[in-house]
C-alpha cells in the first residue's frame, strides 16, 4: 500500500514527548496554522513478551580488515589492499627448523597501522626474523602461512517486551485532522516490522485510534493513534574471528573484545 502525505502547504513538526506550551502559543504554534505530531510511551502499558528459549549468541557479518599476507618461500609480505584499517588480527603460522611445532604469531591491528608497521610488529615476535619495509624474512622457517581475521558484532536477546505508544496529531483545522490523521494511521498500520537505527527490528501492532475534542473551543483538534511495540532487549559484544586452531599462540583474546566465539578464517 502506498499512502501519500496530503500536500496542504502547512508545517508539520514531529517530536518525541508531549506538546509544549510554546507549541500552543509561540510563533510556530498550532494556533498559527502549524501542525504537530507527538510520540510518547504510555505509563502503565508495559507487558513482558514471549521470548525465544535461551539466550544464544549469534554473529553478524564480520568486518574483515583489508590486509593481505603474501607468502613467497621464506618471506611474508604485508599488503594493505584498500580502505581504512579499523581492527582485526593478522598473524603468521611458522614452524622453525628443529622445533617440530607450528606456532601462531598474531598481531592485533590498530587503526593507525600501515603495512610496514604491521610487519615490524610481527617480525619482532619471531626468532631469527628480519624486516625490511613490509617484508618479513624468516630464514629458518619450514612452514610459513599467513592468517587474517576480522571482527563481527555478536548479540543475544535477553528479554522481549511490549510497550504501548501514543501518536498524537495536533492541529487547528478539523479537516487537517482527518486527512493527515488518516495518512498517519494508514501508513503506520501498514508497517508491521520497523528497522531501527541499530539494525534491530521491532513489531508494530495497531491498538486503536480516537479523536479528542476537549480543546475545540480553543480551535485545537487532536487525533490519538495507539500502537503496541514489541521489541527485544539485546546484549552485544565484539567477536574476534579465530584465525587458526590447534596451534600454540601467544594471543588468547582480542584486546577490544570481551568474548571469543565461533569463526575460522583460513587464507
Image (cartoon, rainbow, N blue to C red):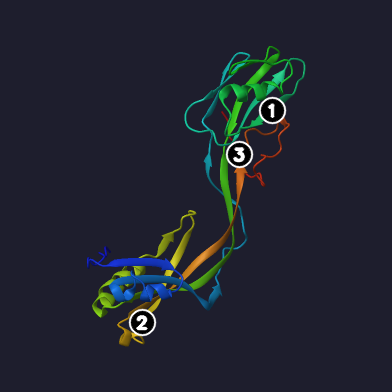
Quick check: can you spot residue 40? Answer: yes
Residue tagged 1:
104
Residue located farthest toward the top when viewing the structure as drawn = 139
Label 1 or label 3, whichever comes before in sequence order: 1
- Secondary structure category for the residue under label 1: strand
Could you tell which of marks 2 and 1 lies nearer the N-terminus?
A: 1
Camera sees residue 19: no
> Does 158 sit above or below residue 212?
above
Give the SS element for disc 2.
strand
User: Does residue 261 appear to the left or right of 82 in the view shown?
Assistant: right
- Residue shown at the point (56%, 47%) measured from the top left: 153
**Marks 1 and 3, how far apart at CA:** 14 Å
Residue at coordinates 32% horizontally, 67% vertically from top-left? 12
Q: Residue furthest left?
A: 8
Identity of the residue drawn at 70% across and 33% down: 246
User: What is the x, y in percent for residue 241?
Assistant: 60, 39
Which residue is under mark 2? 210
Residue ID at (36%, 72%):
26
Q: How many marks?
A: 3
The residue tagged 3 is: 241
Q: Residue 200 appears at what percent x and percent y?
A: 49, 57
Kindly indicate the quadrant of the structure image that contains residue 118.
Answer: top right
* In the depicted structure, whether residue 156 falls above or below residue 74: below
139 left or right of 66 in image = right
In primary-sequence order, the first of circles 2 and 3 is 2
Give the Cα separation between the discs numbered 2 and 1. Answer: 66 Å
Amino acid at each position: 500500500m502506498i499512502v501519500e502525505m496530503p500536500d496542504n502547504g502547512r508545517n508539520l513538526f514531529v517530536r518525541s514527548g508531549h506538546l509544549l506550551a510554546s507549541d500552543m502559543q509561540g510563533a510556530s504554534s498550532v494556533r498559527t496554522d502549524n501542525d504537530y505530531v507527538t510520540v510518547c510511551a504510555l505509563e502503565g502499558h508495559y507487558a513482558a513478551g514471549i521470548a525465544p528459549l535461551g539466550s544464544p549468541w549469534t554473529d553478524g557479518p564480520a568486518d574483515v580488515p583489508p590486509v593481505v599476507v603474501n607468502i613467497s618461500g621464506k618471506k611474508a609480505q604485508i599488503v594493505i589492499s584498500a580502505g581504512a584499517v579499523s581492527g582485526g588480527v593478522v598473524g603468521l603460522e611458522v614452524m622453525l627448523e628443529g622445533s617440530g611445532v607450528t606456532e601462531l604469531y598474531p598481531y592485533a591491528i590498530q587503526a593507525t597501522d600501515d603495512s610496514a608497521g604491521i610487519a615490524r610488529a610481527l617480525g619482532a615476535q619471531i626468532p631469527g626474523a628480519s624486516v625490511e619495509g613490509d617484508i618479513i624474512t624468516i630464514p629458518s622457517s619450514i612452514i610459513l602461512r599467513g592468517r587474517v581475521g576480522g571482527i563481527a558484532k555478536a548479540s543475544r536477546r535477553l528479554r522481549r517486551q511490549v510497550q504501548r505508544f501514543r501518536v498524537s496529531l495536533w492541529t487547528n483545522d478539523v479537516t487537517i485532522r482527518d486527512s493527515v490523521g488518516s495518512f498517519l494511521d494508514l501508513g503506520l498500520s501498514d508497517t508491521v516490522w520497523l528497522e531501527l537505527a541499530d539494525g534491530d527490528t521491532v513489531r508494530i501492532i495497531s491498538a486503536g485510534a480516537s479523536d479528542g475534542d476537549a480543546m475545540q473551543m480553543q480551535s485545537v483538534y487532536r487525533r490519538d493513534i495507539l500502537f503496541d511495540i514489541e521489541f527485544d532487549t539485546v546484549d552485544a559484544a565484539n567477536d574476534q574471528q579465530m584465525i587458526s586452531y590447534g596451534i600454540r599462540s601467544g594471543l588468547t583474546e582480542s584486546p577490544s573484545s570481551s568474548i571469543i566465539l565461533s569463526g575460522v578464517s583460513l587464507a
